């Protein structure tokens, strides 16, 4: 299962579904983004493999473990670390889950992750971590 947090239009999670993911959970709180996300899931005919959660990714309710977590929050706010911690606490991260995140270069790396790959592009970092906590 894939978790696309700060999902926006759902592009990351929908791409994972198109490449064979069994299912995806999308977490987004912005109303306009949620409307676009719902339209995109329907346009991709992925309703049966998608779950849309209208919520704050930093305060998730109890969840089921996901093997792949995709994070693309606004840059410069330290949201990646806070989200990883919140998802771990709420049970959203499977043991050894992979976390792919795009965030600002100045944002800190969260606790409980082991780096697997990292690339820098302008003001952004794209990283892949394994959840270790």
Image (cartoon, grey):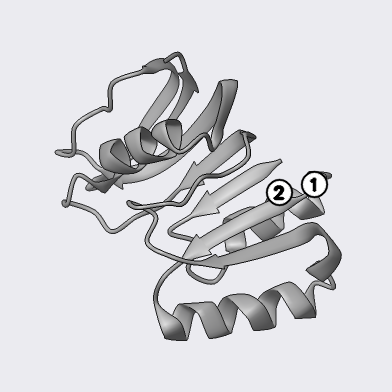
Q: Secondary structure at mark 2?
A: helix
Q: Are marks 2 and 1 in contact (CB under 8 Å)?
A: yes
Q: Is residue 9 left or right of residue 127?
A: right
Query: Foreground residue, 51 or 11?
Result: 51
Q: Which mark is residue 47?
A: none
Q: Gap in Å between the C-alphas at discs 2 and 1?
A: 5 Å
Residue 15 in the image: x percent, y percent?
A: 69, 55
* Residue drawn at 80 percent across, 70 percent down: 47
Residue 102 location (% of width, % of height): 38, 44
> Is the residue marked by circle 1 packed among few (<14), some (14-19), or many (20+) residues within 10 Å?
few
Residue 9, position in %: x, y? 54, 71
Circle 1 — which element?
Answer: loop
Considering only vertical position in the picture, is 87 above or below 60? above
Seen from the viewer's position, the closer of residues 12 and 63 is 63
Q: Residue under circle 1?
A: 19
Q: Which mark is residue 16?
A: 2
Q: Position of residue 39 (x, y in %)?
A: 67, 83
Q: Answer with left or right where residue 102 lies relative to residue 98.
A: left
Among the 4 quarters of the image, the one containing residue 55: bottom left
Dot 2 alpha-carbon crowd within 10 angstroms: few under 14, some 14 to 19, many 20 or more? some
Dividing the picture into quarters, in which one does residue 115 lie? top left
22 shown above or below 81: below
């Amino acid at each position: 299962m894939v978790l696309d947090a700060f999902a926006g239009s759902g592009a990351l999670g929908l791409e994972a579904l198109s490449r064979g993911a069994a299912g995806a959970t999308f977490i987004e709180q912005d109303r306009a983004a949620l409307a676009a996300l719902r339209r995109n899931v329907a346009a991709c005919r992925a309703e049966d493999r998608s779950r849309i959660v209208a919520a704050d990714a930093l305060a998730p309710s109890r969840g089921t473990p996901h093997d792949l977590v995709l994070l693309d929050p606004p840059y410069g706010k330290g949201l990646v670390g806070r989200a990883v911690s919140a998802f771990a606490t709420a049970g959203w991260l499977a043991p050894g889950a992979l976390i792919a995140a795009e965030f600002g270069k100045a944002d800190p790396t969260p606790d409980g992750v082991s780096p697997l790959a990292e690339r820098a592009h302008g003001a952004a970092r794209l990283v892949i971590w394994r959840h270790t906590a």
